[in-house]
Each structure stands twice: as structure tokens, then as C-alpha cells.
Amino acid sequence: MNILQAENLSISFTRYTGWLRREVIMPVRQLDLTLEAGEITAVVGASGSGKSLLAHAILGILPVNAKVGGSIRYRGEILTPAKQARLRGEDIILVPQSVTYLDPLMRSGTQVRLAARSSDPLKLQREAFRRYRLEREVELMYPHQLSGGMARRIMAASAFVSGARLIIADEPTPGMQAEDVAETMRWFRELADQGHAVLLITHDLESAVTGADKIAVMNAGMTVEWLPASHFSGRGEMIRHPYSRALWNSLPANNFSLPQASFRKVSGGQEGPGCPLAACCELATARCREELPGMREVMKGWVRCHAS
Amino acid sequence: MGAPGWLKYACGKLIRLASLLAAVSIITFALISWSPIDPVQAYIGADMMKVGAEQREEIAAYWGLDQPPVERFLRWAGAIMQGDFGNSMIYREPVVEVIGQRFWYSLTLMAAAWLLSGLFGFAAGSAAAMNRGGRLDRSIQWVCHTLASTPSFWLGLLLLMVFAVWLGWLPAGLGVPAGVAAEHITIADRIRHMLLPAAALSITGISAVALHTRQKLINVLDSDYILYARAKGERGWQLYRNHGLRNIALPAMSLQLASISELFGGAVLAEQVFTYPGLGQATVQAGLRGDVPLLMGLVLFSTLFVFAGNTAADVLYRLVDPRMRGYEHDSRIV
Ligand code: SF4
């Protein structure tokens, strides 16, 4: 079942630089995404590609000077700010990336109970603690007393007790040991198996490929390709977009370090009519510089590129 | 663990207090000795012409003013060590008694002003920050900036003119009604006499507290944990109670305790404007008329008072903030 659908989403900020000079930056320009219940979808992109903004846009917690274009639908209905305010914490929950997202002066058990949607928050919180292998006394600890692993469990437990249908995890595995990554991914898989939709925002393609069902690749503020995670295999023969392929092949495990590393430097803000990647794409043609590639359905996914 | 930690802390504080008191009394004494005020002349006042040189010398000798300053200081310090603060020259009463009587007037005045500025300032600052950029926020900021740039004695005079002279609602001065026997003075009388000075004293404090609270709360509202709390569906009053209040209450409390020194300074002015018989007024009198024992007593006492406020702020932080408390002091976690 289709839980969330983002179409042609753009996020722009207006800043005043100097004496009344207005500057509009658009870190997200063309983002399309579909999330299904029971599935994990990973949005993969280099830092600065506008991934975290996507999470904030879905939740409706962008800064006040942000403008959102395009549309986001939740279970078929357009998400308005009022609807977002109702759904936050009820239907949609965020799993943040670090301990700084916990209130430094509140015991962790209380923080989990605040997220619980239940008539007996304490019971639910204890259940979540057992589930995420947190000792009973961690309940009384303050964030500065938690290890990084414990903080992650607290935040996962908060998502669990909320009972939300859509779980958005923002960079859940930064700089973690392989076994911790595997454990975190297992939590999300369990939630997906229970029928939740999970959106994983990450720059770590490797863990996304092993843990997710679908992968959306982002660059320059747009989703360039959407495909099943299983297509990331071998030398990337099933990957249609040159950037996704370059990303896959540049992984250390693939040992293919191709020279497409310059792709990573591309970030939002390029002007002009053509494909924002044209400047550093080796497949670029004259057409790429003139015309923004549209979204094209391909086998089990879609891609935004003239060459594929 | 516990005991040695706090014992060390207490000893450190005591040593600091002792050296502070010593330094303050030396400096004050030196300043008085260099001041051009002749205590004998100040004491005798208008009757100066009638008093002969011999008599004046006798008075000076009676107060010990004929000795060199260093000797006088040492004698005073020695007496202090035995708990003898001496007698006030102008009130002709033991210094301890003068301070004792006036302390209650000042304490109630300052406590009222302290509570008023703390509560109103905190509420106004919180309201402004929660509505950042909105109309309420801008009006509160405007009022605060206006008040902050208003001299407090001028504000005192304004209050006096409006409420005491024009409207006649409140008495214009003194701590108790004039010409009424002590046993007929009610608490309501005292409160009525305290209202105007307390208002004048608290108003400038309110803007400082409000602006500080607003800034603190805005920093908190910009933090990751507020973003996460909002993502979990918290908003408005609930968000403020759960995370805002919790994170600004401590800095606000300690700032308020540390502001006691400014309050003391403000009280001198307010008491002067409203002829309120508190410590501030006594300090001005003692200074102008060269009443050395009283002035020294007052200086020591106010230093002690301000020091107590600052220490309370510090201790509060250590006791309440879990980040300062550390594991070993948190008995609930083993
Ligand atoms: S549209 Fe052209 S420039 Fe853009 S990625 Fe495809 S081939 Fe490269």
C-alpha cells in the first residue's frame, strides 16, 4: 500500500545577504519518492544533497524561511501544515541521528514515554526497553550518561512506542561499527515486517543496499533514479543512471574506483536549463546541456537521464 | 565519595569569603580616611560655631579619631574579631542594632522587587520567545528596551508623582505612617509603604530578566532536541513545559540569585527617592556624615549578603543540574 508520495518536491530558502539583497537557494529541486507499507526505502546521496531537508519537509518542521513546492501525499491525501501537525508523532515519527536530539535535562525513560501513544506509557516504554536490550536503570539516566549505542536505542524505542506508520530515520548509521549497522538495520526490518513504511536517509550506499528494499539516489537536490536495492550488484549492469552507477562502483568493496568521483562534488544551486550533472558527467551530450531530463519508467523503477 | 568533595568546596568558599571581606574592609577604610569629610564637623552640623576647638578635640578623642588611620583600622579589626562592631556615631546605637532594624525593611523591599522582576521578567521573556517574530514578541522587546534605558531614579520620581501626588493612592515615602504609634501600625500599612519603592526597584530588573530569558529560550528552541520533540508531535504549551521551562529555569534562577548585588545598588537609590528607612538610606547617611563604624558594618554586611546570593546560585547549579552532579552523586542510579 502506498503510504507516502512526494511529487516534484522542491525546498528553497530566502536569505538576505548584505544590504537588502535577496538570495534564493534551492537545495532540493526535483524530488520524487514513493514509500510503500512493509518496505524500507533508502534515500542515498552525498552530504549536502538535501536529504535531511526531505525528512523535515515531510514532518513539516522546516525553518520558517523555507518554501516548499510540489506536493507530498500521505495515504492519498495532500499534506497540509495543519495535517502535518496532526500526524507528527502519531502517524509519522523521526528517528534522529545523534544524542543531541535528546533533551539534556530529562531522564531517558521520560523521553520515551512522551513519545508513547498508549493509555499506559510506562508499560509500553518498559516493553520497548526490553525489545531494544536496554537495562531497566537506563530509564533514570540523563542523555550525558548514555553511550552512543544506548542513545540510538532510546531513539529507536521512541519510534517503536509511537506506533507511527511511517518511520523516517535520518542518518541512523554514521561512523558505526559493522555489527551496530547490522543491528540498526535489523530494527528497521522488523518494523517494516510489521507493516510500517520506513524511510532511511543515508549517505552510506553499502548499508542501504543490504538493508533496504528500494533505493532512491539523490544528487544536486533531485532524485536521479529509483530502483530495487537488488539491482545494485555486480558491476552495476542493472543500474541505469551514470551517477548511481558511479556511486556503486566507487565503493571500496567493489574495488573499481572509477574516476567518477567528481560526481560527488555536484550539489544544489546550479542554474541553467540542462541536467545539473552535465558539467561532470562523462556521458553528457549537447542535449543534456539544453534540456532537463524527465522521469522515465524503466524496468521496476524510474530514471532521470537522457542517456539511459 | 561525597563528603571530601563538598567539604573542599565549602572550605574554598570560606577562604574566598574571608579574603573578600578583608579586602573590602581595607579598601573602604582607606577610602574613608582619604575622604574630605570631617566626621566631627558632620556630627555637630549647624552648631559648629557654638562648639569650641577643645570640645571638638574631646569628641575626636572620644571616637578615637586622634590616632593615625592604620592604628584605628587595627583596633576596629580587632574588635570585629570579637564580634564587636562598635557604635554608630550618628544614630548613637550599636551598629549591629542599626543594621538589624533596617535590614528587615530592606529585606522585604528587596525580596518583593526580586520576586516581581523575576516572575514578570521570566513570564514576559518566555511569552516573547514562544512567539518569536510575532506582534507580542516585538511589543515585549520594545517595552523592555525602553525600560532598560530609563534611569531608575527618574522612574521612581515618576511613580511618586503619579501614584502618590496626583492619584494619592499610595504614601509618598517613609516605611511606616508618620505620627502613628508603633503598636497601631499594621502589616497593610507596611505593604502600602513598600509598594512604590518595590515597583521602582523591580521595573528595570524586569527588562533585563525578560530579555535574558527570551534569548535563552530562543537558543533552546533552536536546538536539535526541540526539533525532535516537535517531530514527536509536541507543540505550544506542552513543548514549553516539557523542554523549554526545564532548560531555562536553572540559568534563570542562578542569574536571578547573582543579580542580588545589582539589587543592592538599586535599593540605595530607591530608598533615597522614597525616603524608605532601609540599609541603602543608612549607607548614604553614614557615607555623607563620616560614620565610620556604621559604614564599615554596612559594607561588610552587604558583601556577605551578595556573596550568599552568588554562592546560592552556584550551589543550586551543582545540586540540580544532572550534568554537574555526575554519576556518583546520583544515588538513584547504581
Ligand atoms: S542527462 Fe546527460 S548529463 Fe545528465 S546524467 Fe544523464 S547523461 Fe549525464
Image: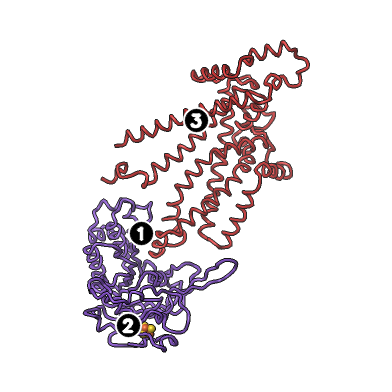
Chain colours: A purple, B red
Give the spatial CA distance, label 1 vs label 2: 43 Å
Relative height, residue B159 to residue A4 (above, below): above
Q: Are marks 1 and 3 on the same chain?
A: no
Tell me whether the residue at label 1 lies in contact with that at label 3, contact meaning CB atoms closer than 8 angstroms.
no
In this view, the residue farthest toward the right is B49
User: Quick check: which quadrant has ligand 1?
Assistant: bottom left
> What kind of residue is marked 2?
His
- Chain to which the residue tagged by mark 3 belongs: B
Whether residue A225 can be seen here: yes
Q: Nearer the viewer, mark 1 or mark 3?
A: 3
Beta carbon of the mark 2 residue lies under 8 A of ligand 1: yes
Q: Nearer the viewer, residue B156 or A206?
A: A206
Q: Are marks 3 and 2 on the same chain?
A: no
> What kind of residue is marked 3?
Leu
Q: Quadrant of residue B298?
A: top right
The secondary element bearing badge 2 is classed as: loop
In this view, the residue farthest toward the bottom is A287
Beta carbon of the mark 1 residue lies under 8 A of ligand 1: no
Relative height, residue A288 to residue B278 (above, below): below
N-terminal of the pair, mark 1 or mark 2, is 1
Residue A114 is labelled as 1
Q: Nearer the viewer, mark 1 or mark 2?
A: 2
- Chain to which the residue tagged by mark 1 belongs: A
State the quadrant of the N terminus of chain A. bottom left
